[in-house]
Amino acid sequence: MQDAIGRTLTFQLPGTAWVRGARDAIGLAVRNVLDNAFKYSFPGRQIWVEVVEFTEGCQLIVTNFGVPVEPDEAPMVWQRDYRGRHARKRKTKAEEGTGYGLFIVRQIVEANGGRVSLESSICSAELWKTTVKLTLAAPQEN
């Protein structure tokens, strides 16, 4: 799957991964993470989406290559109203943000018994790899 400026979305998914939680809310969290991956990826770059299943649930892993999230900013991206230094420099309407997206993601995931994390590392002078992980709990057995 490729968009108009050459960013490619690649999936690695198990058959079906079941999680516990409010379906619509978790769907909103997933869409927000994917939206951010596209918004902050550079043209022609790949976005990877992977779901890893384990006994206690599953983990959604979204990796993109583009706008940096500096290591000192990684914990702050989950706070309300926070936008990273490099994200604030983006100029086009499509790149604007409010600073609420990842805050809402964290609220949804944690309210449903999950965890969030973000890792960012430098690939070259201007290219960074950013990975967002949402760890979600498996459904409870009756």
Image: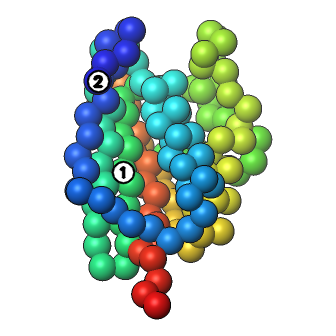
Look at mark 1 in the image and give the residue it sits on. Answer: 61
Q: Residues within 10 Å of mark 1 (few under 14, many from 20)?
A: some
**Residue drawn 53% across the image and 40% down it:** 31
For residue 142, above or below residue 112: below
Q: Position of residue 81 (x, y in %)?
A: 76, 41
Q: Nearer the viewer, residue 80 or 51?
A: 51
Note whether residue 106 is visible: no
Identify the image quadrant of the N terminus.
top left
Specify the quadrant of the image occupied by residue 59: bottom left
The residue that label 2 is drawn on is 1
Q: Amino acid at mark 1?
A: Ile
Of residues 79 and 94, the one drawn nearer to the viewer in this rendering: 94
Please provide percent x and percent y for residue 124.
Answer: 30, 26
Image side of residue 115 versus residue 47, left or right: right
- Marks 1 and 2, how far apart at CA: 18 Å
- Residue at point 72%, 41% (across, down): 100
Question: What percent of the width, then of the height, locates residue 13?
Answer: 25, 50
Secondary element under disc 1, as helix, strand or loop, is strand
45 versus 100 height, above or below: above
Amino acid carrying mark 2 in the image: Met
Q: Position of residue 89 (x, y in %)?
A: 63, 18
